[in-house]
Amino acid sequence: MKTPNSKRQLLGIVFVFALFIISNGRSLDTNSQFIKAVNLGGWLVTEGWIKPSLFDSIPNKDFLDGAWLQFKSKTIGKFLAAELGGGTIIVANSSLVSDWETFRLWRINETSFHIRVFNKQFLGLDSSGINLVAVSTDYKTSGVFEIIRKSDDPSLVRIKAPNGSFLQAKTQDRVTADSKGDGQWRDDDPSVFKMTIAQRLEGEYQVTNGYGPSKAPQIMNDHWNTFIVEEDFNFIATSGLNAVRIPVGWWTASDPTPPKPFVGGSLQYLDKAFLWATKYNLKVILDLHAAPVSQNGYEHSGSRDGFIEWGQTEESIQETLRVLEFFTARYANNPSLYAVELLNEPRADGVSLSVLTKYYEAGYKVVRKHAPNAFVLLSNRLSGDSKELLPVASRMTNAVIDVHYYHLFNDIFNNMTVEQNIEYVRTNRSEELQAITTLAGPLTSVFEWTSEWKVKGATKEEYQRFSKVFN
């Protein structure tokens, strides 16, 4: 059963995520309705910021997959770095930290890891078995490292190498695995490093791999069974909304035996969601939120370590099309299926427009094969040109360009007042929407926006005013 706070929790989700479709005077359906929906984020695709308590019981949860770590030698006073970003030796000569000085974890268990560098090679030892390098692109041959923290100061660590010895920074140009690691954690011990956790990922991959195969199935099924329930669909329907947007991950199409570390069980809850939507006369926007090997590197894409690798191989695209086919065929005859979003938030710096266009054209055909009347949503690339999808979308029937608006992740909003934020929506956002919503072109949706911003100490009424301007 849901807790007594479930409706307040859901109201919070409604407040954060909503959508509308701009038609420029054209009807969206036979009832000429605007679509206003709640996004059921954090349910079938985990996002730690939505439910951080889901991660609370993971042992050594600082070291989940994709944690970005930086190591400063206590003796030399410089950071470890992958020379040239990877492909050669590891050095200890950097006074500043950036990409080459950042190491990403692939968790094996709570203390053992593969460690990846900027150019996607893994840490290992050279042919001498002593010198630390990053040359292998195959984690299976790179070796396993352990990170051991000082009991009374967890920012101090030693790193045990695959040969059983500990890493030490002997010089700025030579990092070796030949220390016993049995000293007193003093500043003159070259095996001691000051560790900084630069970034964490808390998504579906992290929560399932963090708990491991024995605990994750029960943890996830308890979450799916309680986070969203039938009562919530009734509440949505009686609160003036007429649709739900349901983010799903690619692994759910392989239920009940998805690839590890993902666990089975989510598909039955997606089935229930469609049944509840039909019962309460709600439309469903099915959103492929996470694609194989990640389209944006963020935790909500199911990423393991923050790298964007979707679209870099034909197999990743074909696997995504198979996932689309599975979902569309499964729900095509359900009266609640209203739209299918082919891919959520691909990122411009990792996904080229040509690759994305090719995929969108193929995905459109897959959806049309099973659901000829459903709307097909094409998500704009993050940091891409807002009008770049107009050519491909204009060649499609019932296509919608999806844009997302946040006042959180760009420095231009750092010092804006309440009134400046509101005016930005009325002018900049409005102008952009008008530019991509032409009379003869595709429809436009704002499937994600938030009333959260960088304004400090805003009142409830100011939050409400900001929310209303989006409507």
Image: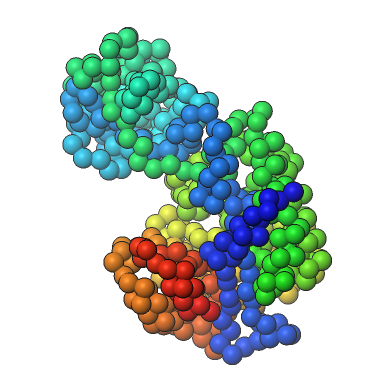
Q: Is residue 164 visible?
A: yes
Q: Is residue 114 above or below residue 126?
A: below
Q: Horizontal and vertical percent for residue 467?
A: 49, 73
Say which residue appears at 47% left-offset and 53% top-offset.
296
The reply to whether residue 85 is in sight is no
| Residue located at (72% from left, 70% from top) | 237
Q: List x then y, in percent, for residue 434.
A: 46, 84
**Is 250 displayed left or right of 185 in the figure?**
right
Question: Camera-side residue: 440 or 105?
Answer: 105
Please indicate whether residue 322 sits to the left or right of residue 353 in the image: right
Instruction: Please count the marks in the image.
Output: 0
Q: How is the image coloured?
A: rainbow
| Residue lying at 22% horizontally and 28% vertically, measured from the top left | 92
Residue at point 50%, 41% (across, down)? 304
Q: Nearer the viewer, residue 439 or 244?
A: 244
The vertical placement of 296 against 279, above or below, is above
Q: Is residue 142 above or below residue 13?
A: above
Give coordinates of residue 111: x percent, y percent: 47, 23
